[in-house]
Image (spheres, rainbow, N blue to C red):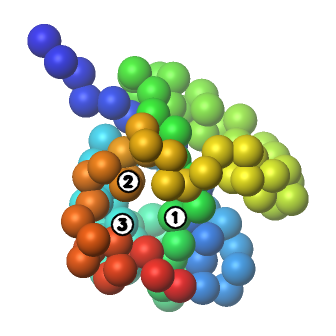
Amino acid sequence: MTTTPWIVYILQCADGTLYTGITTDLDARLIKHTNGTGAKYTRGRAPFKVIFTESHPSKSAASTREAAIKRLSKQEKLKLTHKRPKEHPTNPLTTRLSPTRKRTLLQP
């Protein structure tokens, strides 16, 4: 039995603010954020750029990590994103999105 990994992600919004969330389907979640049906915070702040992703084996682990990241300052979050390249080979974002969808959803 395979379990779907939970993904912690950080978006950089068009206004420069950062949003942290979790999901099991990053593609679908990005579409919701872009359409304005995702988190209330992200409405009207598109376009978004995914600057960080991290996989976790359970919702509990992802939620714990999300809460820890949300407690960080903006500068600490940005440092965190520089420690791990976004285009890391195990990054679910880069392995699951088609090149067209990447251009459409992820370009600032």
* Placement of the N terminus among the 4 image quadrants: top left
- Badge 2: few (under 14), some or many (20 or more) residues near its Cα, within 10 Å? many
Q: What whole-number distance in Å separates the C-alpha atoms at marks 2 and 3?
A: 10 Å
User: Which residue ends up furthest to the top in the rendered image?
Assistant: 1
Q: Are marks 3 and 1 in contact (CB under 8 Å)?
A: yes
- Badge 3: few (under 14), some or many (20 or more) residues near its Cα, within 10 Å? many
Q: Earlier in the sequence, mark 2 or mark 1?
A: 1
Q: Position of residue 50 (x, y in %)?
A: 51, 64
Viewer-proximal residue, 14 or 92? 92
Q: Which residue is mark 1?
A: 50
Q: Which residue is mark 3?
A: 30
Q: Is residue 7 visible?
A: no
- Badge 1: few (under 14), some or many (20 or more) residues near its Cα, within 10 Å? many
- The residue lying at 45 percent from left, 27 percent from top is 56
Q: Position of residue 38 (x, y in %)?
A: 38, 67
Of labels 3 and 1, the one closer to you: 1
Q: Are marks 2 and 1 in contact (CB under 8 Å)?
A: yes
